[in-house]
Image (cartoon, rainbow, N blue to C red):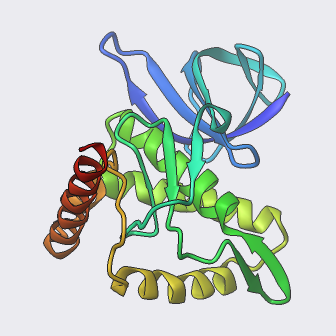
């Protein structure tokens, strides 16, 4: 059985409680219709479509998602370093962002930590109706779980990543994907980034048009 951490709970229209839980190793996500009270951050086990807590049946899995359903791309410029397509089929990591970073003499694969664990989780949550800020917060917790699983100190990793995030934000965009989900920038009210993104997208459209002539 696979272990999942409950990230949030919601009540359905008929009053039933649905839990959203994520396995930070793969990662993968499940929605569970609970038949008993559980708390956020409780660890549950899932076997096919049945969920357990401390070996006791606690509900049925209504939906599951897996990172394998998505394509990871490092071919574009992304203002916030990571991002995702509107339809959720593509996850982006900026092409200039280091794909390996050294943290206390250990190498961390940022495609795994940022793209596959942070951005994937964030997109799942956003698509379920959560705000960007809340989704980002929970996605960061999954990224942290993964980093700790690797045996890497989270604070040291976070400081190292922050340096590159700052550099990346200040770098002029070269080629933004036309299907980039702009929700993070809109909800952050980052007008400067939005302006640059839209200019980059318009340039890409012009380039395509010229190529097709």
76 displayed left or right of 102: left
Q: Is residue 21 above or below residue 119?
A: above
Name the quadrant of the C terminus: top left
* Closer to the camera in the image, 116 or 138: 116
52 displayed left or right of 86: right
Residue at 17% over, 76% down: 192
Residue 208: image x %, image y %? 29, 49
* Closer to the camera in the image, 49 or 99: 99
Q: Is residue 108 above or below residue 184?
A: below
Residue 143: image x %, image y %? 62, 61
The image quadrant that residue 87 belongs to is top left
Name the quadrant of the N terminus: top right
Q: Is residue 29 above or below residue 211?
A: above
60 displayed left or right of 127: right
The image quadrant that residue 85 belongs to is top left
Residue at 42% over, 15% down: 16
Residue at 36% over, 64% down: 175
* Direction front: furthest residue: 213
Residue 205: image x %, image y %? 23, 52
Residue at 24% over, 52% down: 210
Q: Is residue 212 above or below residue 112?
A: above
The image quadrant that residue 199 belongs to is bottom left
198 displayed left or right of 68: left
* Closer to the camera in the image, 192 or 103: 192
Count all numbered tags in the image, as a single digit.
0
Residue 34: image x %, image y %? 56, 20
């Amino acid at each position: 059985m696979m272990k999942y951490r409950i990230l949030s709970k919601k009540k359905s229209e008929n009053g039933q409680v649905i839990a959203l839980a994520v396995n930070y190793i793969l990662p993968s996500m499940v929605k569970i219709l609970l038949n008993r009270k559980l708390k956020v951050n409780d660890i549950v086990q899932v076997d096919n479509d049945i969920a357990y807590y401390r070996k006791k049946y606690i509900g049925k899995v209504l939906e599951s998602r897996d990172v394998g359903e998505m394509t990871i791309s490092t071919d574009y410029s992304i203002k916030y370093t990571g991002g995702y397509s509107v339809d959720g089929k593509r996850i982006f990591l900026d092409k200039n962002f280091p794909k390996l970073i050294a943290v206390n003499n250990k190498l961390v694969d940022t495609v795994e930590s940022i793209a596959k664990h942070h951005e994937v989780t964030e997109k799942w949550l956003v698509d379920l109706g959560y705000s960007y800020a809340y989704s980002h917060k929970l996605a960061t917790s999954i990224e942290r779980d993964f980093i700790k699983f690797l045996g890497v100190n989270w604070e040291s990793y976070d400081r190292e990543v922050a340096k590159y995030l700052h550099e990346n934000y200040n770098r002029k965009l070269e080629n933004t994907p036309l299907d980039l989900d702009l929700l993070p920038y809109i909800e952050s009210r980052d007008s400067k980034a939005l302006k640059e993104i839209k200019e980059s997208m318009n340039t890409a459209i012009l380039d395509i048009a010229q190529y097709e002539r």
